[in-house]
């Protein structure tokens, strides 16, 4: 059973309550004890500060089952990906709902930041390096665009389509951007998933970072076929970065209170 987003949101509220009570008790101690007044302790109120017990207590928690935290994926990226996934799945827009691909551009390009999740079998199928656009950033992705010729990556949800054999990039997969204003120009920009020699561990060892594309999520030529053949023809891909403008305006996240 795939971990429910409702259960995830319930845990977020529970965590917020725990943090509130911790802060409340701290200020009671601060008020009644002069010793505590000397301690400059700061208590975070972020809804994404999760206590270890919050993760371990849920056997059905896919994030925990797949040890995605140990693989470097942020819970925020996973949460947002599952939000859009559930909405699109409920609307019947996913021909291949068993698979979900997450690209976490909040990580360094030296990290393996592409994750292919088998939601049905609860397996991490692929975990590898993936490039961002040349004008999106150097080692770290920072700037994003939906404009043709920008050479930048685009955030948001994509539907995987069929394959193609390009003259310059070889075997590749077409991507359809699902979010107006954020990635809906993907086809016009020829944003595809393809293999590239600059998207390899060897390139990182030689240059100190992964190479960059013209905006495409490029992976190692050695793994492009296994990945594409897994996720092609109607599965969902989510490219994440904690960009306030995107997170506040994405229609696919609005029903989950992301842009309220």
Image: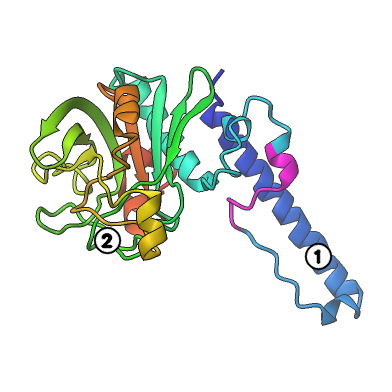
The quarter of the picture where residue 46 lies is: bottom right
Percent of width and height locating residue 118 = 46, 24
Q: Which stretch did the figure color magenta?
A: 46-55
Position of the N terminus, as image quadrant, is top right
Badge 2: residue crowd in 10 Å (few <14, some 14–19, many ≥20): many
Query: Secondary structure under badge 2?
Result: loop
Helix, strand or loop for the magenta stretch, by majority: loop
Q: Label 2 belongs to which residue? A: 136
Percent of width and height locating residue 221 = 28, 39
* Residue 137 versus residue 146 in the image, above or below: below
Residue in the image at 18% along x and 53% along y: 214
Residue in the image at 34% along x and 30% along y: 227
Residue 49 shown in magenta: yes
Query: Secondary structure under badge 1?
Result: helix
Whether residue 243 is visible here, answered yes or no, is no
Q: CA distance from mark 2 to mark 1?
A: 42 Å
Whether residue 37 is visible here, answered yes or no, is yes
Percent of width and height locating residue 8 = 58, 35
Percent of width and height locating residue 222 = 33, 36
Who is closer to the viewer here, 132 or 257? 132
Apparent side of residue 178 relative to residue 165 in the rendered image (left or right): right
| Circle on res. 26 | 1
Apparent side of residue 174 relative to residue 24 in the rendered image (left or right): left
The quarter of the picture where residue 171 lies is: top left
| Circle on res. 51 | none
Identify the mark nearer the N-term, 2 or 1. 1
* Residue 59 versus residue 179 in the image, above or below: above
Who is closer to the viewer here, 119 or 89? 119
Q: Viewer-nearest of labels 2 and 1?
A: 2
Who is closer to the viewer here, 73 or 34? 73
The quarter of the picture where residue 128 lies is: top left
Residue in the image at 70% along x and 40% along y: 54
């Amino acid at each position: 059973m795939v971990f429910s987003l409702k259960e995830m949101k319930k845990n977020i509220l529970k965590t917020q309550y725990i943090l509130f009570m911790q802060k409340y008790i701290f200020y009671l101690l601060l008020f009644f004890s002069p010793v505590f007044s000397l301690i400059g302790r700061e208590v975070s109120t972020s809804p994404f500060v999760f206590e270890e017990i919050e993760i371990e207590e849920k056997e059905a928690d896919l994030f925990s089952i797949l040890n995605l935290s140990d693989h470097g994926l942020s819970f925020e990226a996973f949460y947002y990906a599952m939000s859009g996934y559930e909405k699109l799945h409920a609307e019947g827009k996913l021909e291949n709902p068993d698979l979900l691909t997450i690209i976490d551009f909040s990580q360094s390009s030296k990290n393996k930041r592409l994750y292919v999740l088998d939601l049905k079998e609860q397996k991490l199928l692929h975990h590898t390096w993936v490039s961002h656009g040349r004008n999106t950033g150097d080692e770290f992705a920072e700037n994003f665009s939906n404009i043709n010729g920008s050479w930048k990556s685009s955030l948001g949800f994509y539907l995987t389509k069929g394959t193609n054999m390009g003259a310059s990039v070889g075997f590749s997969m077409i991507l359809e951007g699902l979010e107006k204003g954020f990635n809906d120009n993907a086809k016009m920009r020829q944003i595809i998933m393809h293999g590239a020699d600059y998207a390899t561990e060897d390139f990182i060892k030689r240059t100190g970072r992964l190479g960059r594309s013209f905006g495409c999520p490029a992976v190692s030529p050695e793994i492009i076929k296994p990945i594409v053949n897994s996720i092609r023809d109607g599965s969902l891909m989510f490219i994440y970065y904690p960009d306030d403008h995107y997170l506040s305006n994405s229609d696919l996240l609005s029903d989950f209170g992301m842009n309220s």
